[in-house]
C-alpha cells in the first residue's frame, strides 16, 4: 500500500515487519518511511486484559493519541512553533522584561532582630504579651547608648559624668527630626524623644541623680563639711537621702576599693582637687550605658522611634565631638541600616562575577562552535543571549516584588549570584544539542523542535524541582527566609521562561545565519564527522573506565568514606546563631555589640516577668504564690540575688513601713493620703498608699510596671496586671547558656498558670531561632525531597531512575551539610538558606542524567533525514547520556562557581556561607552526575530502566480496547480502523512531532 509517496506495509503483510524499529522523517517531515505494524493477528486468542475502558474505535483512537502526548513530543511541537513565529516570542519576552521597571520602587530593609524567628515560636507570643501590657501598636524598640572615656580611664570622674548628663538632656529634649506622615499627608512635625518616650522618659534618671549627689558630696568635702549621713555613693546600690538607687543598670565594669582585682595605679587618674574617690568607694567605671525606649501607643509611634534612632545614630557618627567621651550606640534599626549598607557593597562584586561568567560563556560557546565547525559572528550574539536571560530574570523578579510592595533583605541580594550560575544551565544544554544538529540540511523549525525535544523535558524537571524547593522554603514560618525563597523561586521561573521565549528565538536567528553561511555542506561534513568521532571515542573510553571492575570497587570504597564523613558531619553540626559573625567586618557597630556581649550581659542580663492575672496582695494564698515564684527565679544559679530584683511590691511594703502616717508629701495640697479605714487584709497589706508611692520621685518609674484599673469597690484589687525584672549575670560566655536560661524561665512560668505568667527577654527571638533551626531545616529538607521525588516521577516515569535521582539528591545534600560542618560552619539562618539552595541545585546534576539514561532510543540525522535509533545496550545508554549532558553539566558547574567566587573578597560571613555551599554543591554534584550515578545505572538491568509507568497503563488499556474490538467488530471495520490509525500516526509525523513507536506497539497491534 502506498501513502504520501512512500511504500508502507498493508495490514495483510505487516506481520513480516514486526521487528523493524527504525523511524525516518525526511527534511520536510512529511513522509514516514517505515514503522512497526499496527495490525492485529486474527487468529490470536482473546485474552482477558482486565476491565474494558470503553466500547468501540473512539476509545482506541483516544488512547493512541494520549500515547503521543509524551513530554518530549510536546516540546518538539513547541520548538516548531517558536521556529515558525520567532518574532512573536521576542515580543512576548520584551513585554515580560518591562516588569523590570519596578526596580525603582525596590525597598532594601532587614529585620535582623525578629526576621529569622518563626512566627509560631514562643517568643512571638511573649512579645505580643509585652506589647499588650504596654498598650503598644508596634514592636518594642530599644536603643542602647554607651559612653567610654577616650583615655581609657574611669568614667566616674565628675567632669565626665557631667558631660554624660548634658548629652542625656540634649538627647531627650533637644535632638529632633522632621517626621512626615505619608499615609495621612499631614504637615511635617518636629519630633523629640520627650514626645514619644511616655512612661519610659526617666529610664536613665539614675545617672542624673548619682551625678548630682557626687557633685554635692564633693562640694561639701571641698568646703570642709562632713558628708551626708543619708547618702552613700556605693555600687551597685547607692543610698541617696535614705532611698536606694540601683546603679547596675547604667554603670558597667565597676571596680571598688575592696575588690580583689582592684589596682590603684591602673584605675586612678583624677586630680586630687576633683578626686571622686574622696566621696565614693567606686574607683573605676568602664562604661556608662543608657537605654532609650519609646511608648508605642499610637499609630506612627513605631516609625517615629525608628527615625529618632537613626537621627541619633547619624548625630553620633557625624556631629558629635568630644575630647573626653567615646559615643557608641546600637539598636535594631541601626543593625538593619548597617546590614543594608554592607549588602550594597555586593554590587561591584556582582559586576565582576557577571563579567567573569560572561567571558567564560563566550569562550565555551565559541570553542564549541569551532569544535563543530560552525563558527560565525552570530555566535557572539548567542553567547550574549545566554547571559542575558538570567539577568532579565533577576531584574524582573526584583521589579515584580517591588511592585507588590515586598521588601528586599540582605540575603536576597545573594540570589543574583545564584541565578546567574543556574540560569545559564538551560542555555548550555540547548546550545550543546543545537550544535550536534548543525549542518544536517534540516529546516530551522524542525531543528529547534529536535533541540527542545532532546533537552526540554530535563530542563523542565530541574526548573520545576528548583521552584518547588524554594516554594516549600517560602512556607517556613521565618519571614526573612520566606522572602529569600520567594525571590529565588520567582527568579528561577523567569529564567526558564526567558530561556524559551527569548533564547530559542535567538537560536532561530543563529540557525538562519548559519545556514546562509554554509557554502559547501559536503566539504564540511567530513571535518565535523572527524570531530564527532573524536568526541565519541573519548566518551567510549570514559564509559569503559566507569564499567571497569577495579574502578567500581574503588568508587564503592570512596563513596562509603564520603558518606561516613557526610553523615557524621550532619549529625554533629551545631545549631548556633553567632550575631558577631553576621555583622559586617568593618561596620562601626561591631564595637558596641562587643561591649554589650562581653561587658553588659556579663553583669546585667535581665528577664521581664509579666503577671497577667489580677493579684490581691491582701490575700495570703495569692501572695504566697507570688513569693514562691519569686523564690524559684531568684534561687537560680546565675541570678544576682533578690536585692537586684526590680519589683514594685517590695519597695511598696518598705515605703508603707517608713511612712506609717497618712500625710502625702507628694500631693499638690499636702492632704492626707486617705481618710477611710482600709478594708480587711489577711497579710496586713493594702493599696491605700499606692497612689502616693507612685508619685514619689524615687519610685515613680514603677508607673510603667503597673496597670491600674478604677474599682467600684474597695474589696477589688486596683492592680490588674504588673511586671517585674530579675537580674542575672555571667552570661557572656556563649549562647548555649542563654538558651538554657530561657528554657528554665519558661518552665518556671508554666508552673504558675494560675497567675498567668509570661517571661520576656530581648534575646528571646534569637533563642527561638536557634532552638527551631534543626527541626525546621530537617522538616523542610524532607518535605522538599519528597516533592522532588514526586516531580521526577511525573516527568521521568521510570521508577528506578526516580529512585536513583532522589537518592543522589539526598547524598549530595548530606555531603553539603556534613562537609559544611567540617568546614567550621554552624547551622544558622544563612546556612539554612544555603542548604535549601543546595537541594535545589543538586537536581541539575542528577535529573539530566536520570532522564537521558532511561530513554530507549535516540534521534539521529543522516543525509538530512531524522532517524530513531534504538539504544540496545546499557553501554549505548551510558554513551548517549554522557554525550548529551557531560559537557553542558561541566559548563554549568564551572560558571556557577565563577559567578559567585568574587564574593570571597568581601570576607563577610553570609557571602562566605554561600560561596562555600555552592562550591560543595558543584563538587559533589559533578561527582554524582558524571561518576557515581552513571556507574550505578550502567550495571542495572536494561528492562528496569525502560519500564515506563504511563506506557504500561496505556498499553494495557489499548490492548483491552483492541481485544474488545476483535470480539465485537466485523473484519471490514477493523481493517478500516487500522488504516485510519496508521494515517493518524503519519499525520502526526507530518506535523513535525517526533513520536516514538515503542516496543509495546509490536505486542499490542
Image: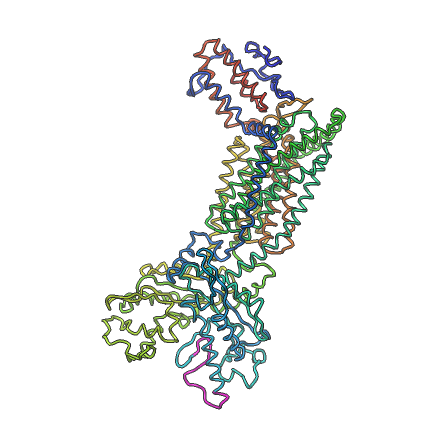
- Residue 116 versus residue 450: which sits nearer the camera? 450
User: Which is nearer the eye, 844 or 699?
Assistant: 699
Indicate yes or no whether the magenta region holds residue 198: no
Locate residue 863: give its quadrant: top right
The one of 554 and 815 positioned closer to us in this rendering? 815
Q: Which residues are magenta?
A: 220-238
Out of 345 and 531, give the one closest to the viewer. 345
> In percent of the image, x 46 and y 90: which residue is there?
225
848 shown above or below 226: above
Coordinates of residue 922 in the picture (x, y in percent): 62, 44
The part of the image, by quadrant, that contains residue 366 is top right
Evaluate whether residue 924 shows in this view.
Answer: no
Left or right of 151? Residue 862 is right
Q: Is residue 233 magenta?
A: yes
**Picture coordinates of residue 393, whole percent (x, y):** 58, 42
- Which residue is the extreme one toward the front? 187
Which residue is most to the bottom? Answer: 224
How far across and down, in percent of the image, does residue 145 sit? 51, 68
Q: Based on the displayed image, in which of its 4 quarters is residue 759 positioned?
A: bottom left
Specify the principal SS of the magenta part: loop
**Quarter of the image where the N terminus is located:** top right
Residue 375 seen in the figure: yes
Q: Residue 961: where, in percent of width, then height?
A: 46, 18
Task: Give the vertical position of 431 relative to 125 (above or below).
Answer: above
Residue 301 against residue 875 in the figure, above or below: below
Amino acid at each position: 500500500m502506498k501513502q504520501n509517496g512512500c511504500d508502507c506495509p498493508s495490514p495483510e503483510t505487516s506481520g513480516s515487519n514486526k521487528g523493524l524499529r527504525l523511524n525516518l522523517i525526511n527534511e520536510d517531515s512529511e513522509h514516514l518511511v517505515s514503522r512497526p505494524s499496527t495490525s492485529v493477528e486474527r487468529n490470536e486468542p482473546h485474552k482477558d486484559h482486565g476491565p474494558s475502558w470503553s466500547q468501540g474505535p473512539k476509545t482506541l483512537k483516544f488512547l493512541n493519541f494520549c500515547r503521543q502526548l509524551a513530554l518530549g513530543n510536546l516540546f518538539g511541537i513547541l520548538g516548531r512553533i517558536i521556529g515558525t513565529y520567532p518574532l512573536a516570542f521576542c515580543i512576548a519576552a520584551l513585554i515580560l522584561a518591562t516588569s523590570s521597571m519596578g526596580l525603582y520602587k525596590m525597598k532594601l530593609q532587614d529585620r535582623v532582630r525578629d526576621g529569622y524567628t518563626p512566627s509560631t515560636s514562643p517568643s512571638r507570643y511573649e512579645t505580643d504579651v509585652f506589647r499588650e501590657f504596654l498598650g503598644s501598636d508596634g514592636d518594642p524598640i530599644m536603643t542602647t547608648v554607651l559612653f567610654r572615656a577616650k583615655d581609657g580611664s574611669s568614667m566616674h570622674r565628675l567632669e565626665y559624668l557631667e558631660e554624660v548628663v548634658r548629652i542625656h538632656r540634649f538627647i531627650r529634649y533637644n535632638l529632633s527630626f522632621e517626621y512626615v506622615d505619608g499615609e495621612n499627608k499631614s504637615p511635617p512635625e518636629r519630633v523629640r524623644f520627650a514626645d514619644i518616650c511616655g512612661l519610659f522618659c526617666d529610664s536613665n534618671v539614675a545617672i542624673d541623680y548619682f551625678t548630682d549627689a557626687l557633685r554635692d558630696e564633693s562640694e561639701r568635702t571641698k568646703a570642709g563639711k562632713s558628708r551626708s549621713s543619708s547618702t552613700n555613693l556605693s555600687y551597685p546600690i547607692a543610698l541617696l537621702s535614705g532611698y536606694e538607687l540601683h546603679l547596675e543598670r547604667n554603670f558597667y565594669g565597676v571596680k571598688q576599693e575592696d575588690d580583689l582585682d582592684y589596682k590603684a595605679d591602673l584605675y586612678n587618674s583624677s586630680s586630687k582637687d576633683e578626686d571622686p574617690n574622696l566621696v565614693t568607694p567606686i574607683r573605676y567605671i568602664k562604661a556608662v550605658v543608657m537605654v532609650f525606649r519609646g511608648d508605642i501607643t499610637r499609630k506612627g509611634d513605631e516609625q517615629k522611634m525608628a527615625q529618632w534612632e537613626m537621627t541619633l545614630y547619624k548625630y553620633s557618627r557625624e556631629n558629635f565631638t568630644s575630647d573626653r567621651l567615646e559615643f557608641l550606640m546600637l539598636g535594631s534599626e541601626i543593625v538593619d541600616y548597617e546590614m543594608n549598607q554592607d549588602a550594597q557593597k555586593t554590587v561591584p562584586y556582582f559586576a565582576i562575577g557577571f563579567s567573569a561568567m560572561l567571558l567564560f560563556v563566550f569562550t565555551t560557546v565559541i570553542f564549541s562552535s569551532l569544535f563543530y565547525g560552525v563558527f560565525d559572528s552570530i555566535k557572539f550574539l548567542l553567547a550574549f543571549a545566554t547571559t542575558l536571560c538570567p539577568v532579565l530574570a533577576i531584574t524582573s523578579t526584583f521589579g515584580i516584588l517591588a511592585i507588590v510592595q515586598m521588601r528586599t533583605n540582605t540575603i536576597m541580594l545573594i540570589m543574583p549570584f545564584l541565578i546567574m550560575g543556574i540560569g545559564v544551565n538551560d542555555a548550555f544544554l540547548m546550545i550543546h544539542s543545537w550544535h550536534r544538529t548543525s549542518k544536517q540540511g534540516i529546516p530551522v523549525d524542525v531543528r529547534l523542535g529536535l533541540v527542545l525535544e532532546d533537552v526540554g523535558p530535563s530542563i523542565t524537571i530541574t526548573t520545576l524541582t528548583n521552584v518547588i524547593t524554594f516554594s516549600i522554603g517560602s512556607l517556613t514560618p521565618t519571614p526573612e527566609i520566606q522572602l529569600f525563597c520567594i525571590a529565588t523561586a520567582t527568579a528561577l521561573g523567569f529564567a526558564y521562561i526567558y530561556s524559551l521565549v527569548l533564547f530559542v528565538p535567538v537560536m532561530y536567528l543563529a540557525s538562519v545565519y548559519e545556514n546562509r553561511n554554509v557554502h559547501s555542506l559536503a566539504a564540511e561534513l567530513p571535518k565535523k564527522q572527524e570531530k564527532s568521532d573524536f568526541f565519541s571515542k573519548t566518551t567510549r573510553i570514559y564509559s569503559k573506565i566507569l564499567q571497569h571492575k577495579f574502578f567500581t570497587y574503588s568508587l564503592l570504597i570512596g563513596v562509603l568514606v564520603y558518606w561516613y564523613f557526610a553523615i557524621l558531619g550532619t549529625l554533629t553540626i551545631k545549631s548556633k546563631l553567632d550575631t558577631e559573625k553576621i555583622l559586617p567586618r568593618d561596620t562601626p557597630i561591631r564595637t558596641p555589640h562587643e561591649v554589650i556581649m562581653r561587658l553588659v550581659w556579663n553583669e546585667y542580663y535581665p528577664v521581664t516577668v509579666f503577671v497577667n492575672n489580677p493579684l490581691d496582695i491582701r490575700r495570703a494564698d495569692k501572695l504566697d504564690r507570688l513569693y514562691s515564684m519569686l523564690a524559684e527565679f531568684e534561687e537560680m544559679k546565675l541570678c544576682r540575688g533578690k536585692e537586684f530584683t526590680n519589683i514594685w511590691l517590695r519597695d511598696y511594703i518598705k515605703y508603707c513601713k517608713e511612712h506609717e502616717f497618712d500625710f502625702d508629701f507628694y500631693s499638690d495640697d499636702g492632704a492626707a493620703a486617705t481618710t477611710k479605714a482600709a478594708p480587711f487584709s489577711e497579710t496586713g497589706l493594702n493599696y491605700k498608699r499606692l497612689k502616693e508611692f507612685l508619685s514619689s520621685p524615687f519610685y515613680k518609674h514603677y508607673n510603667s510596671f503597673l496597670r491600674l484599673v478604677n474599682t467600684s469597690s474597695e474589696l477589688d484589687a486596683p492592680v490588674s496586671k504588673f511586671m517585674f525584672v530579675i537580674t542575672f549575670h555571667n552570661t557572656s560566655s556563649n549562647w548555649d547558656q542563654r538558651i538554657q536560661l530561657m528554657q528554665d524561665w519558661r518552665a518556671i512560668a508554666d508552673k504558675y498558670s494560675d497567675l498567668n505568667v509570661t517571661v520576656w527577654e530581648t534575646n528571646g527571638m534569637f533563642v527561638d531561632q536557634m532552638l527551631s533551626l534543626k527541626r525546621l531545616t530537617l522538616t523542610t529538607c524532607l518535605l522538599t525531597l519528597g516533592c522532588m521525588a514526586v516531580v521526577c516521577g511525573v516527568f521521568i516515569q521510570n521508577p528506578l531512575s526516580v529512585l536513583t535521582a532522589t537518592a543522589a539528591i539526598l547524598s549530595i545534600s548530606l555531603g553539603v551539610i556534613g562537609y559544611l560542618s567540617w568546614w567550621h560552619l554552624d547551622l544558622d539562618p544563612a546556612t539554612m538558606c544555603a542548604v535549601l539552595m543546595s537541594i535545589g541545585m543538586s537536581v541539575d546534576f542528577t535529573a539530566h542524567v536520570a532522564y537521558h539514561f532511561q530513554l530507549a532510543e535516540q534521534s539521529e540525522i543522516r543525509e538530512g533525514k531524522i532517524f530513531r535509533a534504538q539504544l540496545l545496550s546499557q553501554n549505548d545508554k551510558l554513551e548517549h547520556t554522557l554525550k548529551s549532558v557531560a559537557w553542558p553539566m561541566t559548563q554549568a558547574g564551572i560558571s556557577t562557581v565563577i559567578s559567585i567566587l568574587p564574593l570571597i573578597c568581601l570576607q563577610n560571613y553570609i557571602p562566605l556561607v554561600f560561596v562555600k555551599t555552592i562550591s560543595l554543591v558543584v563538587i559533589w554534584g559533578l561527582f554524582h552526575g558524571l561518576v557515581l550515578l552513571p556507574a550505578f545505572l550502567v550495571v542495572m538491568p536494561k528492562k528496569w530502566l525502560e519500564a515506563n509507568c504511563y506506557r504500561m497503563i496505556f498499553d494495557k488499556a489499548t490492548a483491552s480496547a483492541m481485544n474488545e474490538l476483535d470480539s465485537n467488530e466485523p473484519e471490514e471495520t477493523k481493517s478500516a480502523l487500522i488504516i485510519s490509525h496508521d494515517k493518524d500516526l503519519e499525520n502526526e509525523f507530518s506535523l513535525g512531532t517526533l513520536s516514538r513507536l515503542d516496543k509495546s506497539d509490536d505486542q499490542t497491534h
